Amino acid sequence: MSDPANGTSPDTQSSDAAAMSPGSRPVPEHTVVIPPEIPMVSLLGPRDELLRTIERSFPQLFIHVRGNEVRLSGPAEDLLLVERLIDELLAVVAAGQPLNRDAVERSIGMLRSQGRERPADVLTMNIISSRGRTIRPKTLNQKRYVDAIDEHTVVFGIGPAGTGKTYLAMAKAVAALQAKQVNRIILTRPAVEAGERLGFLPGTLTDKIDPYLRPLYDALHDMIDPESIPRLMAAGTIEVAPLAYMRGRSLNDAFIILDEAQNTSPEQMKMFLTRLGFGSKIVVTGDVTQVDLPGGVQSGLRVVQDILVGIDDVHFSALTSEDVVRHRLVGEIVDAYGRWDERQHTGGPRQDRRRRPARREGRGPRDVAAPPAQSPAAPAQPETGEQP
């Protein structure tokens, strides 16, 4: 990419770009003038980090900056997209929010998706501010999820880890409590083992269950003054409890969140949803790819999507790996596991390799395929490559 720092004048750069074009046809150019009240460092980033991010995303576009002017030359489609991007980033800066590489990359993704929502509307949407920190959606699907919580009584947020489905729901609950839209917040989770056994854990029943609820406590501490949380919990304004404690209750004027809903059975999901009282709102979050239920038990979060389809005021929000707001690798890990899971269901080559350890222990294919009690006259069962 050309840069004014190399001593080449803009006119020379434009001529070079034109000479590089096929058939010496003129390359589309446009100059964007940044308002003088906007510091260029807030738009370009320290050491031009944000400018470099834009250049990597549009490798065929030449971007030249001199003073408060940004000259663009290259394919017309890229040129128009970057013009829109600069307008959106200026709107974010004007709203008082600092830019970073993640915000720029997500803005580019939103513009390329050609959705109706503006990136500036997504990135400047404030849910709640606490101790100098503002919680807001960072992706288009997250904004749609937050909007759905405002517009519907029952909302399901379904997506992989790190997409903010629980965190944003918690922020909306705290905002609703502060605005006196509800009188209390109820947070619940099923206490399902993920490889552990509750009975072997030390301590009382409360001590055993507390680790399953700890993520909800952690989110609360990010949004509410930690010193006031014990007082609010003692008064019943905030309640954190296992799902089993919801049975037999009618919850009025409450914001109710069921987290890790993939670990509910269909019966538990029905029990929870029918706790809904007057003036209340329910948000159910979960990841259907991480079910920890014992074998043979169907996930209530999976079947509820078919049961409640078409019911008014019930909304299902889908979040994907593109909405992961943790480390960049988390999204890639989610996609990798998705591809692996698809191979298992389609009987790919990896399934065949899973049987080889049994043969190395001295068990031949016949031993694996036929039980000892099988009659000699019975036909041998073919190998399917599936685990019993």
Image (tube, rainbow, N blue to C red):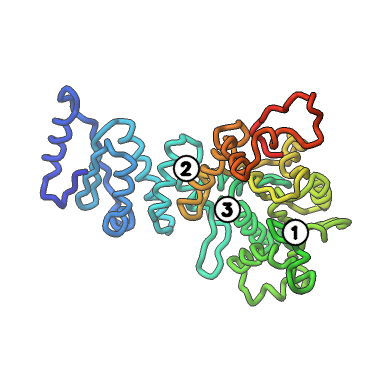
Where residue 316 sits: x, y (%)?
67, 41
Where is residue 304, by image quadrant?
top right
Q: CA distance from mark 2 to mark 3?
A: 20 Å
Mark 1: which amino acid? Ala
Name the residue carrying label 1: 191
Viewer-nearest of discs 3 and 1: 1
For residue 113, side relative to residue 185 (left or right): left
Q: Is residue 311 at all visible to an observer of this figure? A: no
Residue 270 in the figure: left or right of residue 117: right
Q: Which residue is mark 3?
A: 164
Please tell me how many numbered marks the rendered image carries.
3
> Residue 57: percent from the left, percent from the top?
34, 42
Dot 2: within a 10 Å radius of its alpha carbon, few (fewer than 14), some, or many (20 or more) residues?
Answer: some
For the residues bearing labels 2 and 3, Cβ distance under 8 angstroms? no
- Picture disc at residue 118: 2
Instruction: Name which quarter of the figure residue 75 lies in.
Output: top left
Alpha-carbon span between mark 3 and mark 1: 21 Å
Where the N terminus falls, by quadrant? Answer: top left
Q: Amino acid at mark 2?
A: Arg
Q: Which mark lies nearer to you, 2 or 1?
A: 1
Disc 2 or disc 3, which is closer to the eye? 3
**What crowding class fits label 1: few (fewer than 14 Cα within 10 Å), some (14-19), or many (20 or more)?**
many
Q: Amino acid at mark 3?
A: Gly
- As helix, strand or loop, the secondary structure at mark 2 comes to loop
Task: Reply above or below: 24 against 8.
Answer: above
Of 122 and 180, which appears nearest the observer? 122
Q: Which residue is drawn at the image coordinates 79% and 24% (left, top)? A: 377
Residue depicted at x 52% and y 52%: 125
The answer to which quarter of the image holds residue 372 is top right
Determine contact: label 3, label 1, CB under 8 Å: no
